[in-house]
């Protein structure tokens, strides 16, 4: 799909085509549609990010909580499956799986939402290191970090959708 084609979509078709970019949060695409036409991938991405930034904190937390735990064996969106597979999180040893589950649980207890990391270009050691390091963040800092990681994930997904990945 091209940017020109995306700019021509009805709101409903746009949400259908792009609504998955922010995990289980098609409301972002629905709101961003109002700001079309976009001249570039970056402009589209910025429009979607602005929707999240303008949303109340409860909506931001719902967006973060819509993401699966890293290394989880639970059902998740196909995009998440592929992203985690690329980082080797689909082939953890039993010890690594137990370790990532303990880190996920500790992180969620501490912050009230799952650990978010744009894993493209990273491996499982990078993921473990980031999880351990970010457990030392303050809650408000971690909220902003989680959103920044979600913005990176969405940017990767948009680039893939538009054949620019």
Image (cartoon, rainbow, N blue to C red):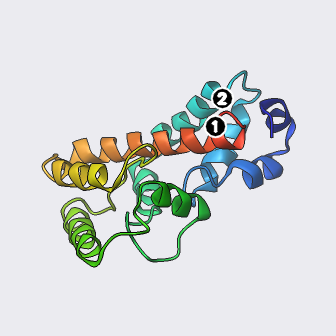
Question: In the rendered image, which quarter is residue 20 located in?
Answer: bottom right
* Viewer-proximal residue among 105 and 53: 105
Q: Residue at x 18, y 62 (%)?
A: 110
* Viewer-proximal residue among 77 and 93: 93
Mark 1: few/some/many CA within 10 Å (<14, 14-19, 20+): some
The percent position of residue 71, horizontal first and vertical second, equals 37, 67
Q: Which residue is mark 2?
A: 41
In the image, residue 157 sits, relative to residue 62, either above or below, namely above
What kind of element bears circle 2?
Answer: helix
* Viewer-proximal residue among 39 and 164: 164
The percent position of residue 102, horizontal first and vertical second, equals 21, 72
- Distance, label 1 to label 2, CA atoms, is 7 Å
- In the rendered view, does 27 fall on the left or right side of 147? right
Q: Residue at x 46, y 77 (%)?
A: 74
* Viewer-proximal residue among 29 and 69: 69
Quadrant location of the C terminus in the rendered image: top right
In the image, residue 149 sits, relative to residue 108, either above or below, namely above
Q: Residue furthest left?
A: 136
Q: Residue at x 20, y 49 (%)?
A: 134
Q: Which residue is mark 1?
A: 159
- In the rendered view, does 161 fall on the left or right side of 116? right
Q: Residue at x 72, y 36 (%)?
A: 34
């Amino acid at each position: 799909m091209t940017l020109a084609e995306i700019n021509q979509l009805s709101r409903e078709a746009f949400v259908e085509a792009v609504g998955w970019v922010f995990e289980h949060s098609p409301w972002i695409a629905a709101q961003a549609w109002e700001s079309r036409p976009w001249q570039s991938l970056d402009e589209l991405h910025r429009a979607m990010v602005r929707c999240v930034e303008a949303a109340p904190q409860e909506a931001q937390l719902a967006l973060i909580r819509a993401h699966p735990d890293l290394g989880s064996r639970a059902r998740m969106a196909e995009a998440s499956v592929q992203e985690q597979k690329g980082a080797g999180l689909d082939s953890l040893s039993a010890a690594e799986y137990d370790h990532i589950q303990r880190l996920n649980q500790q992180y969620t207890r501490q912050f009230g939402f799952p650990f978010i990391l744009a894993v493209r270009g990273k491996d499982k050691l990078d993921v473990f290191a980031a999880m351990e390091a970010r457990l030392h963040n303050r809650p408000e800092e971690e909220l902003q970090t989680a959103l920044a990681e979600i913005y990176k994930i969405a940017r990767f997904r948009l680039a893939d959708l538009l054949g620019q990945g």
